[in-house]
């Protein structure tokens, strides 16, 4: 069941693509914004199916970036995604294993598998919508047996607490639109505002990426003290 948790070949065709997910003329939230977006967006997926370069042979000192489409950087040029900006700021290879539509269940499984296989020094995780669930190995935005707000919250709490117990440095963030009051009860999560919009007019763009990376750098510097 977990053998492909660090691969998304089944979801993404390897190679280059012009559109992905909501970053499409027919699926974007604002066609005028889409067609007036000036930057070129190309999606290149490596042999594991992630929007990233091939993994280096030595992953002993990389930063693992885990999340959903906001980590993939849907609607953004690749070089402006937050993992790429974090790589430039830190000088460390940042491996992007964001997958569009990932539930927090799946994100938690990826964190566990990364630790099991690679004993990482640092993981930066961006948690997703609380309503998503992993059912029989697949992620769903809203499960057909809708759980409701309380169940969604408790499910997130379970995943978050599992990640907290993993004995390595983990920076926790959450996508801007996931849950307004999450930071009140989860003090270890970096909350940040969405300052701009990518081409699909849903995901964030360069200003938000830069703001987020500045917050991540502060956290990383605290780890180093």
Image (cartoon, rainbow, N blue to C red):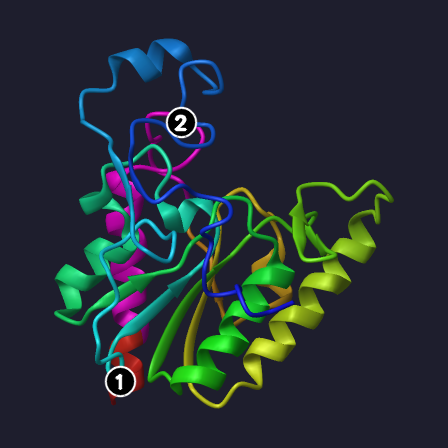
x and y percent of residue 217 in the render?
25, 68
**Mark 2: which secondary structure?**
loop
Residue assigned mark 1: 60
Q: Position of residue 160 (x, y in %)?
A: 61, 71
Q: Write down the quadrant of residue 168 in the picture.
A: bottom left
Gap between marks 2 and 1, in whole Å? 34 Å
165 up-or-down from 32: above or below: below
Residue 94 magenta: no
45 or 93: which is nearer to us?
45
Is residue 169 shown above or below 11? below
Taking the view exactly as shown, the residue that stands out farthest to the top is: 32
| The N terminus lies in quadrant | bottom right
Q: Quadrant of residue 157?
A: bottom right
**Residue span colored magenta:** 193-219
Q: Judge left or right: residue 60 versus residue 186.
A: left
SS class of the residue under badge 1?
Answer: loop
Q: Are marks 2 and 1 in contact (CB under 8 Å)?
A: no
Q: Is residue 205 magenta?
A: yes
Tag 2 residue:
23
- Answer few, some or many: residues within 10 Å of disc 2's Cα (few below 14, many 20 plus, some between 14 and 19): many
């Amino acid at each position: 069941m977990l053998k492909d948790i660090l691969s998304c070949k089944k979801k993404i065709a390897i190679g280059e693509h012009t559109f992905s997910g909501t970053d499409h003329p027919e699926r974007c939230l604002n066609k005028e914004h889409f067609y007036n977006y000036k930057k070129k967006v190309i999606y290149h997926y490596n042999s594991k199916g992630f929007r990233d370069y091939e993994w280096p042979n030595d992953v002993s000192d990389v930063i693992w970036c885990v999340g959903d489409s906001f980590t993939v950087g849907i609607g953004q040029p690749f070089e402006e995604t937050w993992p790429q900006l974090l790589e430039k700021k830190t000088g460390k290879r940042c491996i992007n294993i964001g997958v569009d539509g990932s539930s927090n269940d799946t994100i938690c499984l990826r964190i566990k598998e990364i630790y099991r296989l690679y004993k990482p020094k640092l993981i930066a995780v961006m948690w997703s919508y609380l309503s998503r669930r992993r059912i029989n190995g697949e992620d769903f935005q809203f499960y057909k047996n809708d759980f409701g707000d309380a169940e969604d919250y408790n499910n997130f709490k379970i995943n978050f607490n599992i990640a907290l117990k993993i004995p390595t440095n983990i920076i926790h963030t959450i996508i801007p639109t996931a849950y307004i009051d999450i930071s009140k009860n989860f003090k270890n999560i970096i909350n940040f505002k969405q300052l701009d919009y990518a081409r699909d007019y849903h995901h964030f763009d360069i200003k938000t990426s830069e703001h987020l990376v500045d917050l991540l750098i502060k956290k990383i510097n605290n780890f180093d003290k």
